[in-house]
């Protein structure tokens, strides 16, 4: 069975400080990993996917198969980054989500 | 831009009622999904469909059914609503193995 673990339910970071949201996964095959974000009163939307290897809104995430991790990082947090973040794994024809991390940026 | 529309933002129903949640997408996507979103539990897949009149159980199908009579519409049905089905329900659609696009959600309260 596939599984996604986000160990932090809540994370508070000062503006300008680095951000790292942790995500670990369990999957027997070759996974596709995603980060989704939900800003206050907005719909859930895709932030980035590992195969595109791009930076969105200053965020990056690298798939580490050895550590089965896909941590989300940003070097300098901004107030508008406050949101709920979900890590997700696509495998066996379905998307499995982690429990989410609520990120709060302190001004 | 993909538009996934859920018919209601808020819905209040009583225990034992039959409840229909409707979802429509305008991008001719073949894949459609229903999730429920609960604090501390994340998103859990209830049912999904890869084609018209096709349905597959997700991780938590108990107490729910679905209907997909047309490609653009995917309905979630609570046959006899119970209080533990109070939740936020999210519909999503996708094509092929592309990322899913989500609707705004329906916050359902069962009294």
Image (cartoon, rainbow, N blue to C red):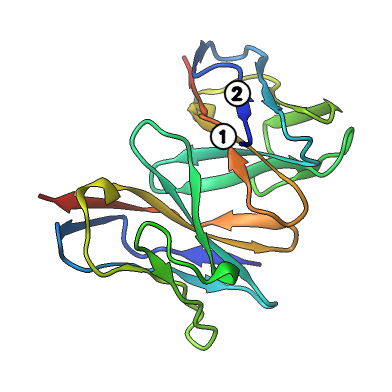
List x then y, in percent, for residue B73.
76, 26
Structural crowding at the residue carrying mark 2, measured as other residues with C-alpha within 10 Å and reported as few (<14), some (14–19) or many (≥20) = many
Mark 2 chain = B
For image coordinates 34% across by 69% down, the residue present is A73
For image coordinates 41% across by 69% down, the residue present is A60
B76 left or right, relative to A18: right
Residue located beneath label 1 in the image: B90
Question: What secondary structure is found at the residue carrying circle 1?
Answer: strand
Query: Cβ–Cβ below 8 Å for labels 2 and 1?
Result: yes
Residue located beneath label 2 in the image: B6
For image coordinates 39% across by 48% down, the residue present is B40
Q: CA distance from mark 2 to mark 1?
A: 8 Å
List x then y, in percent, for residue B2.
63, 36
Q: Are marks 2 and 1 on the same chain?
A: yes
Pick out the residue farthest to the bottom. A66
A84 left or right, relative to A80: right
Residue situated in front as seen by the camera: B49 or B96: B96
Question: What secondary structure is found at the residue carrying circle 2?
Answer: strand
List x then y, in percent, for residue B55.
82, 39
Mark 2 and mark 1 lie on one chain; the one further toward the N terminus is: 2
Pick out the residue farthest to the left. A107
For image coordinates 60% across by 70% down, the residue present is A51
């Amino acid at each position: 069975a596939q599984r996604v673990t986000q160990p932090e339910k809540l994370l508070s970071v000062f503006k300008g400080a680095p951000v790292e949201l942790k995500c670990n996964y369990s999957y027997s095959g070759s996974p596709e990993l995603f980060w989704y974000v939900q800003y206050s009163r907005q719909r859930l939307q895709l932030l980035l996917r590992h195969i595109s290897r791009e930076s969105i809104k200053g965020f990056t995430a690298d798939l580490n198969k050895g550590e089965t991790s896909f941590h989300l990082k940003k070097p300098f947090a901004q107030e508008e980054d406050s949101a709920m973040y979900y890590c997700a794994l696509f495998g066996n024809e379905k998307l499995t989500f982690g429990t989410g991390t609520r990120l709060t940026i302190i001004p | 831009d993909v538009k996934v529309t859920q018919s209601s933002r808020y819905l209040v129903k009583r225990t034992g009622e039959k409840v229909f949640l409707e979802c429509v997408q305008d991008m001719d996507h073949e894949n459609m999904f229903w999730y429920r979103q609960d604090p501390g539990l994340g998103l859990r897949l209830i049912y999904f469909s890869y084609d018209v009149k096709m349905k597959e159980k997700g991780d938590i199908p108990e107490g729910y059914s679905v209907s997909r009579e047309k490609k653009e519409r995917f309905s979630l049905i609570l046959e006899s609503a119970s209080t533990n089905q109070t939740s936020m329900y999210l519909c999503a659609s996708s094509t092929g193995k592309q990322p899913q696009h989500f609707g705004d959600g329906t916050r359902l309260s069962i009294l």
